[in-house]
Image: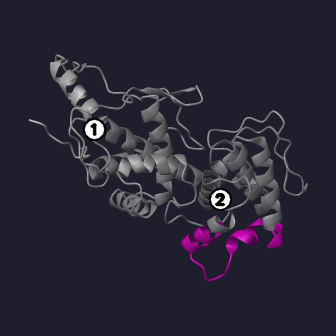
Amino acid sequence: MTSFCRHRRLEATCPICSKQRAREVRDAARPARPAPARTAGPRRGSGTSRRRAGGADVRVRRLARAADDGFHSDLAPGLHATADAALLAEELACAAGRLTALEAGPDAHGVYGEAAGLPSREEGLWLCFQTAVLGTAPGGRVSWASGATPDLSGAEPGPRGVADAGAAAAALEAYRAWAARSGGQAAALAGEAGWSPERRFDRAFERLALPGLGRAQRYDFLVTAGALGLADVRAASLHLLADPRDPTLLAAKRVFGIGDPLLLARRAGELAAQAALPVAALDLGLVNWGRRTDDPDAPRITAGGPGEPDPDALALLRAALGLE
């Protein structure tokens, strides 16, 4: 029977339909191929390293962490290992001991006792600032009265100092100019007569947002000056909004299990209140906790403290975290 295609031609002679029919016949006669077997290996992109388009390898370093043993604390919801919680209590107690040691003034350890014992408050504050920027090594320091800034050639800043010499020099010069606009360092830090020590700390921290000066150096300078009695300032928060790469902030995210800086500040305040701990102790305590959980052999930053946990603070912290 003669049939016509959709092109109104004889189906056998249509140049379009005849080719399509021939393909259908050929495909029907071809044996079916088995589906390729799925390998048990990892999918593409699931490895620990990946090659960039430019040719360089990107390697992700996996750090050892304490094993999850079911630990839980409402004050440190990011921790799931008892060992991490115990180390946190130890480091925060060490930081609390450091603040107590600084409050001894001229009897404090090393350069901090020297700063508190200087006859001029301006010289004491300048020594504290140089220490916050350059570390505790005595090399390169100059007096405030000289009007100069330290020679930073060959300087090796401490763990919380400004690592780049150019940035450190910029910070020291900017600080001198900042203090000069107020008639001196003490006057610049004092602010208004009616301010509380907490408000004075907050305003000074904001105003010290100077070139080359990071959150860690600003915060530690003010904490040190307040503890030594060189300025009437006291920290009421950690000021975690200042630098998204700051080690205190990174450690706080791990401890408190959240990334929002405002909620982090609230949870840090709750932990400090429950353990009767100064908020300022959380700054150095979190830094040391982060360093030592990443590398158990990392040296503890003592920054003028005895380097050992304050026993009373340690007992309160362990109780607050539910370790007792």
Q: Secondary structure at mark 1?
A: helix
Looking at the picture, how far across and down is residue 228, in whole percent?
A: 63, 57
Q: Visible in this render: residue 97?
A: no
Q: Where the N terminus falls, by quadrant?
A: top left
- Would residue 113 appear left or right of 265 to someone viewing this image? right
Residue for badge 1 = 82
Q: Reply yes or no: does residue 82 show up in magenta.
A: no
Which of the numbered marks, if any, corresponds to residue 228? none
Please identify the residue farthest to the front as the structure is shown.
2
> Magenta span covers which residues?
180-204
Mark 1 or mark 2: name the one nearer the start of the chain. 1
Please identify the residue farthest to the left as the structure is shown.
1
Where residue 262 sits, quadrant-wise, is bottom left
Q: Visible in this render: residue 264?
A: yes
Q: Vertically, is 197 above or below 252?
A: below
Q: Vertically, is 78 above or below 50?
A: below
Q: Are marks 1 and 2 in contact (CB under 8 Å)?
A: no
Where residue 4 sits, quadrant-wise, is top left
Q: Main secondary structure of the magenta part?
A: helix
Looking at the picture, how far across and down is residue 184, in whole percent?
A: 80, 68
Q: CA distance from mark 1 to mark 2?
A: 35 Å
Looking at the picture, how far across and down is residue 35, in whole percent?
A: 20, 21
Q: Where the C terminus falls, by quadrant?
A: top left
Residue for badge 2 = 225
| Badge 1 amino acid | Thr
What residue is at 16 percent from the left and 16 percent from the top?
31
- Would residue 294 appear left or right of 225 to someone viewing this image? left
Q: Reply yes or no: does residue 184 show up in magenta.
A: yes
- Of residues 102 and 53, the one drawn nearer to the viewer in this rendering: 53
Looking at the picture, how far across and down is residue 169, in whole percent?
A: 80, 48
Crowding at dot 1, Cα within 10 Å, few <14 / some 14-19 / many 20+, comes out as: many
- Of residues 243 and 91, the one drawn nearer to the viewer in this rendering: 243
